[in-house]
Amino acid sequence: MGFLRRVAGVSLRDRMPGLLSSPVCLTVICFLSWSLRPSCAQIRTDEVSGVQYGRLESNVTLTCGKSQIRIPVVWHLNHSSVLPWHKVTSDGTLVLLHVDHSAQGNYSCYDNRGLLLHSVKLRLGHPPGLLSISCKVPNHTHVRCSWVDSVKTFLPAKYNASFRGTGQEWRPCVVDVARKHCDVDHPAFWQTIHTLRISETNALGSETTSVRFKLHELLKPDPPESVLVNELEGYPKRLIVSWNFPSSWPLHDAFPLMFQIRYRPYGSIYWSEVYAEESPVVIFDALAGYLHQVQLRARDEVNSESQWSEWSPLLLARPWEVSSTSESPEPLQPDYFLTFNTKPETSTAVTHPRDRHEDEGNLGLVILLVLFSVVILTTVLSLIFVVWVRQRRRDHVTKQELTAMVKMKSMPI
Amino acid sequence: MILTLKLLRIPLPMLLDSSSSLLFSLLLAQLPVFTSASPVPQRRPTDMDKLSNQTKNLMKLTQELLREHAFDSDVEPHRFRSLPEMSNRSANDLNNLELKPTLSQLHADLKLYEHHFEWLNKVSKKHHHPALPKLVEMIREMKSLINLLHRQMLRVEAPRLTQATPSLPPHLPYQFDVLQSSHELLQHFKLFCDWAYRAFISLKPKVSAVQ
């Protein structure tokens, strides 16, 4: 540094003798020289020529630069002369024995005059191992595969992932290193088997993991959204459940979903179930006056080998109750399924959104049945009457014929 | 006198007979009216409904066969090189299906599967494969679906594609080969049915627009 200062001073003095002779300028130069000196020294003392990687629980060799001069050297770890278990060879190479994490840090070697010869940062870890990969298929257009290291490497890694269906070309699976997952959009879904290949590479090596899976079996929609459970005014044993398709599911005729709704009075261990393809659904057999737990889940309606979604969060709702202030109004129509189903996991009839229309329809059906019964009864009675009249006539005729015959017999020939 | 009476009396039982017959006829005439009467008007299934239902039925049969004769193998043997190509069909395609080309393609694909399954039926007979009765049922259902689809194609004037020649394995010496082949065919066909079903339900509004 002194040399640098001297060179700078000489050159400047030669060029601008007048300027440098001024005391202000000398002060500035002196200040600059002073301020530069420690920073240069810092660079030299803390100078790290690079990063060296080593395997944990193995011996790691650190060379004191490229110099082959056999001079005695002194090694420091993070400016301290305390080193982990080691030996220094005659050429000044430091061999760290059976290293653990405590051996990581900045290593510097100095000559016998205390001059820094070389410095290196040591990072320890393991080469990559096989990955544990799992894939999620929330719809027919997207696959997300995430992974977990089977070996904790302690080292930064790069991932390269590719994906293909049977007999297809490899295509990239777009990697998010931080979240350790990759995404494939618009896969060729209707293929029997798909393969994902992920290569993990770090400073100590590389490992490729391949997994084969069936997308149609992994298909698992997200839970239904915006689930609402409400009372139905005038119906003390009904609840109406409505929901939306999961936002990740395509809203298209080609992708119908099946929904399973389950409900139970709060505190009961037995669920009742209803299946439906459309929202909303009316629960007909709620327990009057009781708070109910309701939740639902979805599955692809076409592919029965696909998986049910997770259940939506539990919702609490109470059927409509007669207000204590008002007079108790009669229900508009009698409730069906009056008794609460206590069988575990039983299915009740699938209900449809056209509930009110059905009620009207049911009334119509009852009227039709009554009319039909009346017609049948009338017909039967008429038939009986006709048969009776015929029989009577026949008897009468027989009687008359007999009388005629008797009369004819009694007539003289 | 008596004769006259008899003559006069004849029409009365006849009248009675005819009235009872009339009542019976009326009752019988009412029966279908009452039986068909329903508060919710039932929509007659369209041919596209029939196509989708039959495809679903075939898919169910395929799944049953796969379940009953489980052959747990992830190794794809690739015995069949001429099965309909599914790698170029994505979920997005289902949003933009064209009626006539899709019906024609599905018909050609089904014909190709029919050839493969008939071949499988033949080799299964030789090896007395236990799945034979169900396989026969499946082929029957497949033929019925093909006929139904062909009728629909004629209706919308969809062209019939020229049939590709299937390349079938020449010889299956072992029962294991038959099992493996049947597993591969069924796996492919199940996914084909899944796609075909979705295609049919997507095309339903388009058929109504054409007709």
Image (tube, coloured by chain):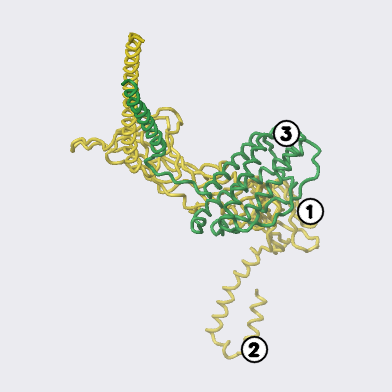
Chain colours: A yellow, B green
Q: Secondary structure at mark 3?
A: loop
Vertical side of A273 occupied by A164: above or below: below
Q: Residue at x 74, y 35 (%)?
A: B125
| Label 3: how many Cα within 10 Å (few below 14, some 14–19, many 20+) | some
Query: For the residues marked 2 and 1, what is the alpha-carbon distance in whole angstroms?
Result: 50 Å
* Label 2 or label 1, whichever comes before in sequence order: 2
Quadrant occupied by the N terminus of chain A: bottom right
At which x and y percent is residue A279?
A: 41, 46
| Residue A290 x/y as whole percent | 32, 33
- Give the residue pinned by disc 3: B129
Q: Residue beneath label 2, please? A: A14
Q: Is residue A327 left or right of residue A205?
A: left
Tag 3: amino acid? His
Q: Position of residue B206 (x, y in %)?
A: 51, 57
Q: Which residue is mark 1?
A: A89
Residue in the foreground of this view, choosing between A354 and A138 = A354
Which labelled disc corresponds to residue A130? none
Question: At 76% from the left edge and 47% from the top edge, which residue is drawn?
Answer: B168
Residues at marks 3 and 2 on the same chain? no
